[in-house]
Amino acid sequence: MSVVTEKTLLREWTGPLTEELVLQPRTFGLDRLPARLQPDATTTTVCGFCSTGCGLNVHLREGQAINLSANASYPVNLGMACPKGWEALTPLRASDRATTPLLRDAAGKLSPVDWDTAMQVFSLRFKAIQDKCGADAVAWLGTGQICTEELAFLGALGKFGMGMVHGDGNTRQCMATAVTAYKQSFGFDAPPYTYADFEQSDVIVLLGSNLCIAHPILWQRVLRNRNHPQIIVIDPRKTETAMAASQHLAIKPKSDLALLYGVAHLLISNGWVKSEYVAAHTSGFTEFQEFVRTFTLDAVSAQTGLTEGEIFHLAQAIHRGKAVSFWWTMGVNQGHEATRTAQAIINLALLTGNIGRPGTGANSVTGQCNAMGSRLFSNTSGLLGGRDFLKAEHRETVARILGIPANRIPTQNSFAYDQILQAIAEDRIKGLWIIATNTAHSWVNQASFRDLRRKLDFLVVQDMFHTTETAQMADLVLPAAGWGEKEGTFINSERRIGVTRKVARAPGAALSDFNIFKLAAHYWGCADLFAAWTSPEAVFQILKRLSVGQPCDFSGIRDYHHLDAAGGIQWPWPGGENMEADETIAPARERRLFADGKFFTADGKAKFIFESPRALPEPADEAYPFTLLTGRGTSAQWHTGTRTEKSDVLRKLRPAVIYAEINPSDARRLGITPDSNVSVSSRRGALVAQALITSTIQPGQVFIPMHYAQTNQLTLGSFDPYSRQPAYKACAVRLERVRRTRKVIDE
Amino acid sequence: MMPPTASNSEGRTLIDALLEEQRALTAVERFAQWHDTQPHTSSMHRALIPLSAPKAGEQYAFEVDLDRCSGCKSCVTACHALNGLDDHETWRSVGVLHGRSRNSFQQTITTACHHCVEPGCVDGCPVLAYDKDPLTGIVRHLDDQCIGCQYCIFMCPYEVPTYSAARGIVRKCDLCHQRLAHGEAPACVQACPSEAIRISVVNQETVRAEYRPSAPATVTATNSFLPNAPQPAITLPTTRYVSAKPLAVDLVAGDSHEARLQPAHTPLVWMLVLTQLGVGAFSLLPAAAPETQTKLSAVALVALLLGLTGSALHLGHPQKAWRAFLGLRRSWLSREIVVFSMAAPVAILTTLAVILDWPLGFARGLIWLNATLGLVGVLCSGMVYHVTKRECWRGEHSIGRFFGATALLGFAAAWGISSREGALAFAIGLALVTIIKQARELAFLRRCPDDADLDAELPTNILARSAFLMRFRVGVMVRTRLASGFLGGIALPLVSLLPISNHQLIAILGFSLCLVGEFIERALFFRAAVFPKMPGVST
């Protein structure tokens, strides 16, 4: 193909405008790029949005990131990225970045102050609250969005340095259920799989997961499966993933627990159980067998709205599959009986021996980029390294490794997110420090949090942006550097530890969360406890020591360079006696757990855990006849949109106005026309959304994406009793057509 | 309890140290070296591009496997990042088709330039800033040749070229021809996690035969290119949307219920109305009384020149517009520009001839030549819109409308300038033309039912939907237009015939109202234009 490049008087084939798009020869193994974007060096990093944990090539010029592309050699994403990843650098340049600490002044306005003032006030006000109301009257709400080293610093500083007892994170909103389910069933929070399992199954069961939209790069792995797998999607909505599946079970909202018990009953009653496996590696089967007896096909069919044939087919597919993998996401985790539902999935994998082999597993697909880091090291619900605050030997081990007095470590468990808020309501917590999360947008029954703000004596919000709904409520805003402006590690869904790098300068006086914690320790007067916590990489070495002997032992990783060269390393990767990294043995690129059938429980067996399903806390009724479902809208949106809304391109890829998906028959009945305004109200609040009339939602249900600020005005503050995770997935609402009629013009 | 003073100064030192550390960028020294030695990855995606170049009669084309497209939109962002587009600029988009029937259904659709066999952009461009490569069939835009007239945006049924005000040009997808030339896949192809997009070679005659079958009986209601897409017969798009499962029949695009107003294109409104006033007034010169001719030709000339100047404001690069003759063979815009460029000097001469009382025969010849050129110019203006094949702009709605305005404004000007005695015929002519023109416009508005309101479902018919937009989105404009047209074109001309009135004042007022009315009419012509588009998503 010839590219004509002559410039004639009549036709300008070249020139400055054409030049802008002329692609230069390839460098650094990257694609061709225009001269303006030609890098002088590259580095790799791990994406800071979701838990897929994609590797990105950052294109640098004079040390600064100018562009990025997907990393083809990283084992997770194999050269692909979703829109958020491609646009990851754009939010860093947003005009509403927090660039200086802001303190609410006498007039009630947030005004700039210097770091010295900010940190003196921080320490003064929190100490005053603790002096008056007790050390546990100050708490924090953290995140799954910052580096593991930072999460550990926050957790250690909060509890061991500042004397707090209660701290939790937004991971409570996404992963707490999986954590609890795994801990109880396997003895440790241990997602057993590796992404290659997507490629090696012959039956893939997706529950409450719109993988195509929420984790597009994992869907890529499904499509790379050469076994022509049967893909079964269990979801009330005909999602993009359901469309792509071989079978879609459009289940009634939150009837999944009954379905899973029904399938277990079918497997058992048809003799489709891997008895040798169950006998050797599990406990509680006899009781479970007895328990599921009542979940007969007709009863389950009535409860789930599925036909008996559909349910039987599911059981049969699981039985016939040679390698069956089960994958779940928020559709399961955010339910009122979520932990038992997750465990019901685990039970199916155990019954059929679908665990520990390629292409199998009961696999929770995580949400945030570092939810897994938070699970191990945030020092909130568990003590550092997946330990237990209630166990003296665990406290002593941690104290010894950190070189701190054991009595600095709380001997009680932390409140969960909802309990912290409850304690604020009851005036037991008066000071709150929120880090990298947007509670005022994302928490269930939003109005309740807004009321609580008034009860707090002092609210500190640490964030990249001073414009988040939560930062706007703060007494003190601490400006944080974002992903890309600091260094550290993330742990992804498949337990892979990857390095994220500093490739851009934080604006103004914004500091990395790590450095803010360092400052906080200094001003609090407890810096001596953290003398060894000099840099993220120094803390990584501390975390390695904390992991020794635990199921998550990764002491065999030398340092960040080792992680980089290996393309990330999955835990466990234990070192030798003296924690030496033996780099002559390279970890396999994809590793899964439980190949030996040994679990982390005391008896080494996985447990069948089960409980009778309970009714929805707020079923649809006469006054509120619709069930509201919430979830991910598009792959271009992330959570409360504080970052994704800052990219012009990502904004083009999502509907700007909040919308509600409504079935055509409901719309017809209520006189709701496409794109007209519809009022959606629950017992807690009301919003107006644009009607999206589509057959992908079933009659009697409404779906509203979670990214819009109004959505959580409707949701219900109900929680799974074991994981304390909010049940975002179902509450009762009413729909009404909103008239905005103007009469026709007079002609 | 304040921290001790010593701690404060230490605190300050620590803050300084941390701020300094924050500013230091270390990734290059610490990590870049190792990555610089990474091998190239150009061999990936080879399976997604053709092994050999197109033969004669063939060309490259996108092929989208709908069964694999799941709406992740990575293609949009990768194209954006790897081609170095502006912050808000995208060359690809992803829409959705929803099922409305009982069987739940949705299908996401990725779309970019279709590198058509008969590209509307190529045919419309007045300066040959588009090139359909004879070897590859790729439709390239020559950015430095572009004058920023944006006519290609009207000519493309797929909203492909997008205008950048900062650059003053449009840009569009070039099928990554620079990558393909090196055996590498386009950015969107590389970046699709589902491998839903590939480059294939298609036979141009096959595309033509499929979308323009010789036997009309085989034309069916379904769009074999893609349901809910613009009719492929217009430009013969080469993208193939393939699926193993048939698409449901009752599909609705994600954005099909949006009633979206289009840009007003003020310079074009200005240009069209004023040139039509000029041409109309010049055309009535032979009918005007000798004492009126001077004033009428002066008004006509001023209007024509203002209109033509105004059109230059529409261009991103007016200094390059001299090349507009290049497209004469294909582009009606080129013809319009050339004809009016000839008309302008003739109009100046004509005006001079009238004012300076040049010999009668010579002046008359100029007057007729001038009127003819002007009317051909108006015809070209009409054809510019007619050939876009947008229903709102076809035939009566463009050519008819423009000649109507020419006559109406011509009569209005002649009436406004003439003395009471000479004005009678012009006043009657004006009233008649206005009645016909307004009646047609009212008939257009009636395409949208009277009882429609903002909550009603939008009409599916294109013209009815345009009428809906006019009545319910820009109703004030429509009412003002109708009122000023009625007053200036019907009421005042009749009043002016009464002996009691101040003829001159009324006539000038009437002419002004007519002019205002036509300006608004033309703004509505652009604002309320509705046309088929590729399925999008609700915004």
Image (spheres, rainbow, N blue to C red):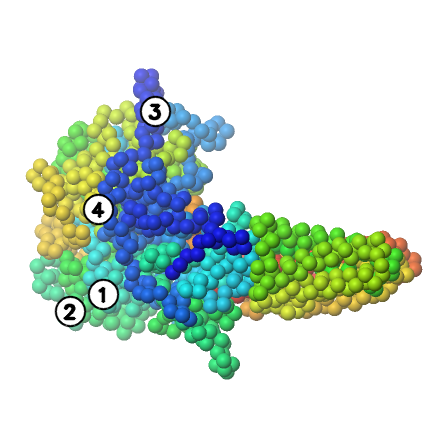
Question: Up-down: is B98 above or below A522?
Answer: below
Inter-mark Cα distance, 2 to 1: 26 Å
Residue bearing mark 2: A272
Inter-mark Cα distance, 3 to 1: 56 Å
Report whether residue A403 is seen: yes
Circle 3: element type: helix
Q: Report if the CB atoms under discs 3 and 1 are less than 8 Å apart.
A: no
Q: Report if the CB atoms under discs 1 and 4 are less than 8 Å apart.
A: no
Q: Identify residue type, mark 4.
A: Gly
Earlier residue among tags 1 and 4 = 1
Q: Which mark is residue A226?
A: 1
- Give the chain of mark 3: B
Q: Identify residue type, mark 1.
A: Arg
Q: Which is nearer the eye, B29 or A156? A: B29
Circle 4: element type: loop
Judged by depth in the image, the label closer to the viewer, 2 or 1, is 1
Most distant residue in the right direction: B499
Residue bearing mark 4: A568
Callouts 1 and 4 on one subunit: yes
Q: Identify residue type, mark 2.
A: Trp
Q: Quadrant of the N terminus of chain A?
A: bottom left
Callouts 2 and 1 on one subunit: yes
